[in-house]
Amino acid sequence: MGRMEYMEKEILKKFEAQDKKLEEIYSSIEKMRKYFIWTLIVTVAMIILPLIGLLLVIPKFLSIYSNSMGL
């Protein structure tokens, strides 16, 4: 029975080590997820919002330009 108890303790130690590693992996993945979310937000702010602004500014510019040309 001594050998079996030793093996059970070793298995429990391995399970505890795996649990610790899984928690570290989860923490790392959560940090990456937050990083990707912020990257998406910055990308939208730097690309999509200026494009929307251009859609609003170009018609106004063309209107002023055509009025100045006498069209």
Image (spheres, grey):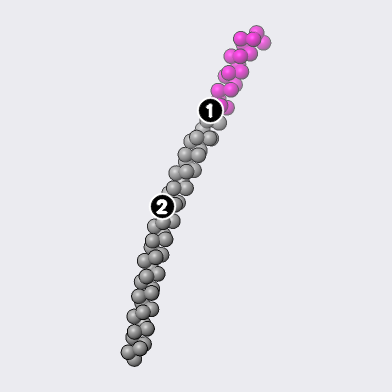
x 61%, y 9%: residue: 68
Rendered view: 63 above or below 54: above
x 32%, y 89%: residue: 2
Q: Are marks 1 and 2 in contact (CB under 8 Å)?
A: no
* Kind of residue at badge 2: Lys
Which residue reaches farthest top?
Answer: 70
| Residue at numbered disc 2 | 31
41 sits to left or right of 8: right
Q: In the rendered structure, which segment of residues is drawn in magenta?
A: 53-71
x 61%, y 14%: residue: 65
Secondary structure category for the residue under label 2: helix
Alpha carbon separation for disc pair 1 and 2: 32 Å
Q: Nearer the viewer, mark 1 or mark 2?
A: 2
The question of residue 60 being in magenta is answered with yes
x 42%, y 61%: residue: 25
**Residue 36 numbered mark, or none:** none
Residue 30 position, x and y percent, is: 42, 54
The question of residue 26 being in magenta is answered with no
Magenta stretch prevailing secondary structure: helix
| Residue at numbered disc 1 | 53
